Amino acid sequence: MTSDPSSTPEAESPPAGPTRSGRVAIVGRPNVGKSTLLNALLGEPIAITSPHPQTTRDVVRGVLTVGDTQFVFVDTPGVHTARTKLGEHMNAAAQEQAREADALVLVVEPKLDERDLKLARELPHMATILAINKIDLVKDKTALLPLLEAFSKAHPFDAMVPVSARRTKGMDGLLKELRERLPEQPFLFEPDTLSDQPTRFFEAEIVREQVLALTKQEVPHGVAVVVERFDETPKVPHIEVAIHVARESHKKILIGAKGEMLKNIGSRARHRVEEMLGQQVHLRLWVRATPDWMNDPAKLRDMGYGADAGGGGRDGEGT
């Protein structure tokens, strides 16, 4: 990640001639590789990834400016059967971003799944690309023919592009198809922008990523992370983060014997945050048991989710 998620290292001037720009929503079911695709397109790991389903909860925006074209990619939560208020918020966020986009990328795996076809049938009618991800796992490419035929009947896709987000294969082809379908208009952001979301958002996501990586199945998705204090005035900035869990037993797991698990999470997260900011930071973590926060609208808003949450901002800091 760059030193500041709101900009890339070298600023560029906008092109003198006509430019294209637009919002591209990346949609699909959980665990098909949407966040990995976003990172591969940007060349920067701004979206957290993990083998857990529904890792992406917030909309994550990444900006890629190439020559006379600016792509504003919007990574969305995986569409799933919601069992909590949080799940409902995630599905609503994905649907809203799809409606507001200039173009869509539906990400699927290289195998027929009725859930993917159902999503394709429900897509709004606009410029839409089918990205068949994990293509590196398919040895016999002729096996894709039934899949291509099924999707062509489900939705009038403008193009179908095989990609491997994990291996960053097929990115140029996907960008080429998208560029042709973005409106001719001025750039939406300065050319050196990587994301317009606040630093606090990425700090919270980095901590949550380490929780998921280190606790694996022991602490499922009943965890939320909130940056409660970000003081940049000292020479070494102080960041205080609360990790909310849905059960008291999960709190013990996160802290670990003699606090070792929490220390490990903090150490790994601090290293990532320092890489992002390009400077040393003091990161302090707390763990709090907040029962059933995923079904409490007020608590969801406090933790940055819900209709009034500001699109991923924390502590009243919107985007």
Image (tube, rainbow, N blue to C red):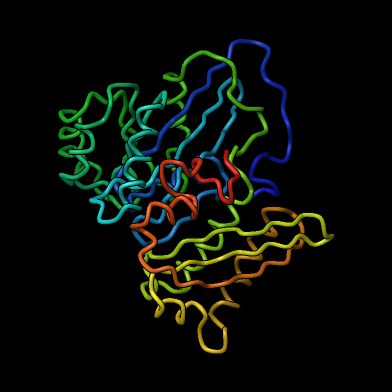
| Location of residue 188 in the rendering, given as x and y in whole percent from the top left corner | 58, 24
- The residue positioned 48% from the left and 66% from the top of the image is 244
Which residue: 72% across, 27% down? 12
Determine the residue located farthest toward the right in the rendered image: 235
Q: Nearer the viewer, residue 132 or 186?
A: 186
Residue lying at the far bottom of the rendered structure:
258
Say if 197 sits above or below 209 in the image. Answer: above
Q: Nearer the viewer, residue 135 or 30?
A: 30
Q: Residue at x 52, y 29 (%)?
A: 71
Indicate the quadrant containing the C terminus: top left, top right, bottom left or bottom right.
top right
**Residue 243: percent from the left, percent from the top?**
52, 67
Residue 235 vertical placement versus 177 (above, below)? below
Above or below, 39 relative to 293 = above
Indicate the position of residue 95 as horizontal and vertical percent values: 33, 36
Can residue 288 be seen from the camera position used here?
yes
Q: Quadrant of residue 275?
A: bottom right
Question: Between 195 and 178, which is closer to the camera in this rendering?
Answer: 195
Image side of residue 137 versus residue 258, left or right: left
Is 59 situated left or right of 81 in this image? right
Q: Is residue 135 visible?
A: no
- Number of marks drawn: 0
Q: Say left or right for 195 vs 95.
A: right
Q: Residue at x 36, y 59 (%)?
A: 294
